[in-house]
């Protein structure tokens, strides 16, 4: 049923998240030494599920359209938000117009001198543009892409009904085991755009993205570190990204855009010394442009399963 055998790990990760959430809800640890690691564990798992959401809206997992629709609901519950809502702002805005005025997630939206503030403020800075763009897409084009719209409505109903029911059942558990992990996942999957693109050269064939090539990191995150390869071939399955990176990206990539560790890069860039630099070491001087409308008339040509590989 799977299009790629590697997606057995996708299904296993979703199962791990579901089982972890259920067990922690049932066990309900009350002491801080047990509660804090539990919330951190679920937050990390939810962020990985957000990466799965990103992969799923680019490349279907199953050969069966009904199974893909069901999987998208499951992923939406694990990530915490309807993943069909990810399609307009990410696939149709960010991928098509990376770092341009049509890109709702362009890094020039944050321009604080203290770079740590840029990391913390990126999500609230780009969210209004994402919401406006998605609403515009739904109003202008959504009525024509019926499969995508039906899937979005299904995910909206299921996700928010489950969240509301769990909150009414026990708001404390819901806050710790549902809301906090999901909000962290949303912050993480959006904010990673700042790390992957800030200070890069969007006009260059491969220097438009920063890559994180650590083996363990990419095993955990489904090769999310190979971001340049993903931008060049958005519909390429995540399991094929390392080979594509080695053959088509790395030979002409600036060495500074192949980072061995995300954690070390984030600490060095946002904590100490915390300087906002281009990939070749010059100070970033971000100048933002007024938003430009990214909704195109041919965006109604979605596949029947609602997945858009950009």
Image (cartoon, grey):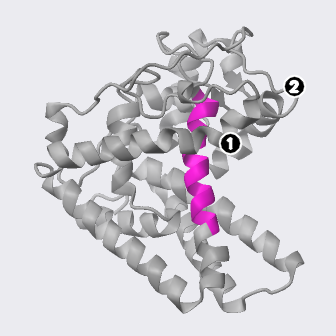
For the magenta stretch, what is the residue range? 180-196
Image height check: is 274 above or below 70?
above
Image disc number at residue 273? 2
Residue tagged by mark 1? Answer: 120
Residue 47 in view: no
As drawn, 100 above or below 161: above
Q: Main secondary structure of the magenta part?
A: helix
**Residue drawn at point x = 19 percent, y = 44 percent:** 302
**For the point 17% across and 53% down, which residue is it?**
304
User: Which residue does the image show at 36% across and 38% down from the upper left?
Assistant: 91
Taking the image as shown, residue 176 lies to the left or right of residue 97, namely right
Q: Quadrant of the N terminus?
A: bottom left
Mark sitting on residue 86? none
Q: Position of residue 106 (x, y in %)?
A: 49, 28
Other-residue count near label 1 (Cα within 10 Å), few / some / many at <14 / 14–19 / ≥20: some
Residues tagged 2 and 1 counted as in contact (Cβ below 8 A) = no
Q: Quadrant of residue 2?
A: bottom left
Which quadrant: the C terminus? top left
Q: Is residue 96 magenta?
A: no
Q: In front here: 294 or 83?
A: 294
Which is nearer the eye, 224 or 32? 32
Q: Is residue 111 above or below residue 8?
A: above
Image quadrant assignment for residue 271: top right
């Amino acid at each position: 049923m799977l299009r790629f055998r590697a997606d057995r790990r996708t299904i296993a990760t979703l199962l791990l998240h579901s089982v972890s959430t259920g067990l922690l809800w049932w066990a309900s640890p009350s002491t801080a030494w047990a509660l804090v690691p539990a919330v951190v564990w679920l937050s990390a798992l939810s962020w990985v599920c957000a990466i799965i959401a990103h992969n799923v809206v680019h490349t279907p997992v199953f050969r069966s359209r009904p199974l893909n629709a069901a999987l998208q609901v499951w992923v939406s519950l694990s990530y915490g938000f309807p993943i069909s809502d990810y399609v307009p702002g990410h696939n149709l805005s960010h991928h098509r117009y990376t770092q341009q005025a049509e890109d709702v997630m362009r890094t020039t939206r944050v321009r604080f001198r203290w770079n740590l503030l840029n990391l913390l403020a990126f999500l609230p800075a780009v969210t209004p543009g994402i919401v406006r763009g998605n609403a515009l897409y739904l109003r202008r084009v959504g009525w024509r892409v019926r499969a995508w719209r039906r899937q979005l409505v299904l995910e909206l109903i299921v996700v928010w009904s489950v969240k509301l029911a769990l909150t009414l059942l026990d708001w404390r558990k819901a806050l710790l085991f549902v809301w906090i992990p999901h909000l962290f996942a949303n912050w993480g999957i959006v904010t990673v755009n700042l790390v992957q693109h800030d200070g890069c050269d969007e006009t260059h064939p491969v220097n438009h993205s920063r890559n994180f090539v650590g083996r363990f990191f990419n095993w955990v995150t489904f090769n999310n570190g190979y971001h340049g390869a993903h931008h060049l071939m958005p519909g390429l399955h995540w399991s094929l990204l390392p080979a594509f990176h080695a053959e088509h990206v790395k030979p002409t990539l600036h060495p500074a855009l192949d980072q061995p560790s995300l954690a070390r890069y984030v600490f060095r860039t946002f904590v100490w010394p915390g300087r906002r630099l281009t990939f070749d070491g010059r100070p970033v001087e971000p100048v933002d442009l007024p938003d430009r409308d990214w909704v195109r008339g041919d965006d109604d040509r979605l596949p029947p399963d609602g997945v858009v590989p950009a």
